[in-house]
Image (cartoon, rainbow, N blue to C red):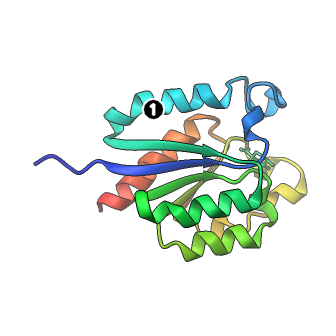
Amino acid sequence: MQQARLRILVVNGPNLNLLGSREPAVYGGEPLDAIEAGLRAAAPKLGCELEFYQANGEGQIIDALHRAPRAFDGVVLNPGALGHYSYALRDAVSAIRLPVFEVHLSNVFAREPFRRELVVAPVAAGVIVGAGPMGYELAIRGLLSRLRS
Ligand code: DQA
C-alpha cells in the first residue's frame, strides 16, 4: 500500500533571505531559493510535499507556526538568531503540537558564546546543526521517520 504523502512546512527566520551573499565563509554561497529548489526536487524521492516560508519578523514566524497545524504534518525551522533568545518562539513551538525539527546551517557551538544557547531546541523534536544546506534534508528525513513511526 502506498504511504500518504506527508506535508512539511520549511520555515526560515531573520536574515536567511540573504543566504548566498551573507557571510559566505560561514553560511556557504547557496541562495535560499536554490536550497528550496533542491528540496522541492527531492520531495518526491522523500515521499512528502513541501512548502516554504521565510520572514524576518518574530511575529510573522510565530503566526506561520500557529497556522501550520491546519495544513501540515510537521515543520522544519531555521529560526536564525531567534533560536538563541526568543521565548515567544519557543512557546509557539510548544503550543502547536506538531513536531518541529530545528536546523542551523552553521555549527553554532563552534562560534560566539551567545550562539551556544538554543532556547527553542529543548521543545523541538530534533536539532540538526552544522550540516550546511544538507541540514534541511536531514531534518525533513528525521521528521518523516518520526511521523511514520
Ligand atoms: C543560523 C545561526 C544563527 O546563529 C544565526 O543568527 C543565523 C543563522 C544558521 O543557520 O547557522 O541567522 O541559524
Looking at the picture, how far across and down is residue 135, in whole percent?
57, 41
The residue at 38%/43% (across/down) is 49
x and y percentages locating residue 121 in the rendered image: 65, 65
Residue nearer the viewer, 23 or 117: 23
Placement of 76 over or under 26, stated as above or below:
below
The quarter of the picture where residue 19 lies is top right
* Residue 90, quarter of picture: bottom right
Of the pair 25 and 60, the residue shown nearer to us: 60
Within 10 Å of disc 1 (Cα), the crowding (few <14, some 14-19, many 20+) is some
Location of the C terminus by quadrant is: bottom left
Q: Please tell me whether residue 82 is drawn above or below residue 26 in the rendered image.
A: below
Residue at x-position 70% and y-position 67%:
89
Q: Is the residue marked 1 within 8 Å of ligand 1, measured from its CB? A: no
Q: How many marks?
A: 1
The residue drawn where x is 59% and y is 58% is 64
Q: Is residue 89 above or below residue 129?
A: below
In the picture provided, is 28 more to the left or to the right than 51? Answer: right
* Kind of residue at badge 1: Arg
In depth, the one of 134 and 67 nearer the eye is 67
Residue 145 placement, left or right of 30: left
Residue placed under numbered mark 1 in the picture = 40
Q: Say what secondary structure mark 1 lies in.
A: helix
| Residue 51: image location, x then y, percent | 48, 43
Image coords of residue 47 (percent x, y): 31, 41
